[in-house]
Amino acid sequence: DDIDKQNAINEKMLDDIDKQNVINEKMLDDIDKQNVINEKMLANIEDLNTKYTVNIGAIGQRWGMASEASFRNALKAILEKSFPVKVINYNKMDTECLVYEKPTPVEIDVIIYNGITILCEIKASVSRGDVYDFVKKIHYYEKKENVEVTRKIIISPMIDSDAIQEAEYYGMEVYSTPKEIKLMD
């Protein structure tokens, strides 16, 4: 009798283990399905993140270019209407590759007053490389127009500290945000 009881208990335990194994397998199946769903969601999130990053970058670039043009137009209107100066958006093709390594249009903002020639670089942001490009543009302008540039000015709301040091080295004036505010580094 005791052996039969023990066998019945063992069979019940084996039956319970089999049922638990079925439940465990279903849970593992559900976990696998959830992992597939999670991977798809993560891929969608990464895709959306890439799209948003690209779109925000494009908006920022358009905003920067529009801001530069707005400032340039305002500078021209204010100076020419208020003072006897000429403001020129100098834009010529550099076929000799003096500024860049290939023929490229060279755009410079020029202010001329009574023999004084001021070149301005108006940009949404300025890096050390932008300063070097401006130096090349200055040399290009001096050579092409046979004139000595009196003042070199960089105007930008965002300029990194290396660019400021380079600009000062080349005798450029930099107009930006207050030095206490570090927007780029």
Image (tube, rainbow, N blue to C red):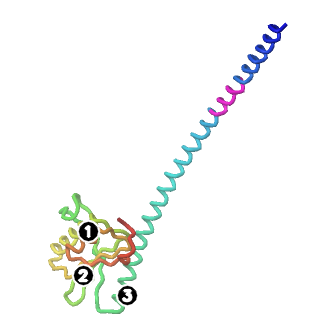
Which residue, given by chain and number where applicable, does mark 3 sit on?
Answer: 78
Magenta region, residue range = 22-31
Label 1, label 2: how far apart the Cα atoms are: 16 Å
Amino acid beneath label 1 = Val
The percent position of residue 60, horizontal first and vertical second, equals 45, 65
Up-down relation of residue 49 to residue 114 (above or below): above
Which residue, given by chain and number where applicable, does mark 2 sit on?
Answer: 118
Q: Would residue 41 appear left or right of 75 to someone viewing this image?
A: right
Question: Quadrant where the N terminus lies?
Answer: top right
User: Crowdedness of circle 1 by 10 Å Cα count: few (<14), some, many (20+)?
Assistant: many
Q: Would residue 150 appear left or right of 185 to someone viewing this image?
A: left
Q: Residue at x 62, y 39 (%)?
A: 37
Q: Earlier in the sequence, mark 2 or mark 3?
A: 3
Q: Would residue 66 appear left or right of 119 to someone viewing this image?
A: right
Amino acid beneath label 2 = Ile
Amino acid beneath label 3 = Ile
Picture quadrant where residue 150 is located: bottom left
User: Is residue 62 inside the magenta stretch?
Assistant: no
Q: Residue at x 57, y 39 (%)?
A: 39
Label 2, label 3: how far apart the Cα atoms are: 16 Å
Q: Residue at x 28, y 73 (%)?
A: 108
| In the foreground, 107 or 42 | 42
Any mark on residue 83, and which?
none
Q: Secondary structure at mark 3?
A: helix
Q: Residue at x 56, y 44 (%)?
A: 42
Camera-side mark, 3 or 1: 1
User: Crowdedness of circle 2 by 10 Å Cα count: few (<14), some, many (20+)?
Assistant: some
